[in-house]
Image (cartoon, rainbow, N blue to C red):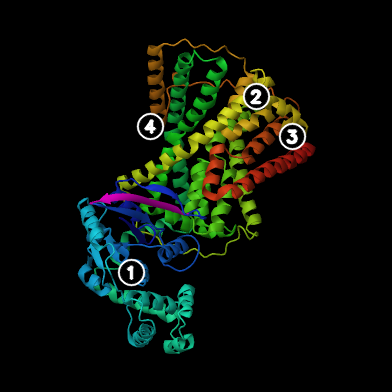
Amino acid sequence: MTYTIAFVGNPNVGKSAWINALAKADFKVGNWAGVTVEKKEAHVVWGNETYHLIDLPGTHSLEEGVNEEGITGSYLRQNKVDLLVNVLDATNLAANLYLTLCLRELQIPMLVLFSFIDEVENMNMHIDTLAISRRLALDCLEVSVLHKQDYKRVRKAICQMVQKPVVYEPLLQGETEKCYVSMFNYLQAVLPQFSLAALHRILCGYMENDRLAYKQLESFSINMEQLQSMRKGIDKLVWLKERYQAIHGLMYYVSGDEQGHYAKTRKLDRIFLHPIWGLVLFLLFFTTLLFLIFQLATPWNDFIAYLVEVISRYAYVGLSFLPNFWRDALLKGVVAGVGGVLSFLPLMLCLYFFLAFLEESGYMARISFLMDRIMRCFHLSGKSFVALMLGFGCNVPAIYATKAMDSEQQKKLTALLVPFMSCGARLPLYALFASAFFTNKGGIMIVTMYALGICMALLLALLFSKSKVFASRAMVIGELPLYRIPRFSVVWQKVKKEVMEYIKKAVGIVSLAMLVMWGLAYFPNGNMASGYIAQGAKAVQPFFEPLGFGNRWESIAALPGGIIAKETIVGWYEQLLQAQKPQTYELSFQEDIKGIVKEAKKAFYKSFLFFLPQEEERENTISVSMLWQDRHAKLRAFCFMVYVLFSMPCIMSLQAMWHVYGWRLTLFSIGLMLFVPYVSTLFIFQLFRLLL
């Protein structure tokens, strides 16, 4: 038999960590139907029984709403759940017990886990767990996910309590309790066929003005006017007040210096949440963080790309029995596509690691809080800012990061704006054109590209926020967790999950796209300069000519490859403008091993020691300065950079958009990033052409 065990709790209380521990990381990740909230579940076999563990979204209540509250409440009310595992942050019980009281009213067997109990001990707090257990009529365990011996205790408790018959009476007092008892006795008299638990569940829902409970009572032919008169004016606010009074009573069983619990956190927050110095420190910190990510990851990206190149040479010789066409299709199409994805793994690994580190430490929540006031001016939130900043590294994780936001409208709006952030893949193109056309002002031009992307995103945010699809007036109320030293095991599990999802979802579609693009460039005669892409570029050249760069078909032909990866634009120019060197496939295993060691050494120097010996540096021999040599050459080059900045992101970003938000928003994003680059580039070129 299969039992459904639902893990429920406030955000950031460690539900996922407990499922990960109990299921030994054998869980599946997906999305709840119709929304972007993540869904985690696992199946485990204990003894002769199968247990379906499901991680419900973190929430503070069960009220109807969007995303977390709506999903958790609807799931528990509409599905058969054999046991609830309510995970509480024992360092902050007052904020966590409200959800516990709401869950009791559902009359589902429940096990309560006081997690982070090791931190409670470090704070010199004491929780009378037995007294709280008796008051709530619930089994409560003091546990820590860091203690493996607690895994067996939790597993044993789940097996013992599953499908255990329960009756949980609401914790009331005074006139409210008398009123509730009289109403309960009335329902019990007119509905004798119902169990005590079912009557409590319906009546608690009625007292909270739940529409479903009201309809149920009407369907039972209950005299609603008589029931309302027995209620004696006790409304939802009084019912909520009773819950908070019950929580206040339960907190008598928690002793210790309540003010001292958060003393260190408050001291740090005086610095990190300061309206001025907090922003300064954040900008310094985030700039340093982005520098470290690229400093650590980029050299290893190049190293993996070199490995793929070596493997391709051996594969080319190994596949010599195949016709040249099929060899090129496999290597330049499939292998090149997979290699392009794998070469970004170090970057993704670093991004996910630092993201998980910031989240576990508690600083990520403070970044959102710090930037929320500024972003509200543009109808966004602090969490939107975090996602947009991640877009400077890579648009793919930035789009996935929008799933952590609260409002469905703001999730979609932020995801729509992420591709306007100048990702690291565009940087090689900026560097190439800046060095070719703006020799003494290259740095300024690169910074200008980043600034233009930010300005366009904020402008579109103001514009789209007026639409019903993206407009959101939801007040986001967040909780700032304690500062914690991140646990490596938890961080690593998050990183591993995200990286595996990235590989799984990206490799297939990128490989297919690379194969298609290669075929379009190869046919009809195997010459890139006269392939279908080149022919198409020449055909649409009049359409792009008003943009400045369109007078050269080579630049137009470079754009489709940017959909696969922006770096391919540089590669396209390199192939077209440099003298073609004959490819040789003479293999030397010994020399290749030396080359791999040499590249690994170079990656180590550049990523960890922040320098590269002068004799090891490679000079960039690519030159595009011959493309335009008239008096508007710099303007044409600038317009091409702007067009690439605003144009469609890579196929992996589009795939991430489709996976998280569906085909409608993806198509809208594609249309937007076809319209914006054309109009903006047309405006820039035609305006400054007259002024210069």
Let me know if residue 46 is in the magenta part. Answer: yes
Pointer 4: residues within 10 angstroms few (<14), some, or many (20+)?
Answer: few
Disc 2 to disc 1, C-alpha distance: 64 Å
Left or right: where does residue 257 sit relative to residue 388?
left
The residue shown at (52%, 52%) is: 385
Residue wearing tag 1 = 94
Q: Residue furthest right?
A: 690
Q: Which residue is mark 2?
A: 624
The answer for how far apart the CA atoms under marks 1 and 4 are is: 45 Å
Question: Nearer the N terminus, badge 2 or badge 1?
Answer: 1
Q: Which residue is mark 4?
A: 608
Residue 137 visible? The answer is yes
Where residue 516 sits: x, y (%)?
Answer: 59, 29
Q: Taking 654 as reference, is 142 left or right?
A: left
Sequence order check: which comes first, mark 2 or mark 4? 4
Residue occupied by mark 3: 544
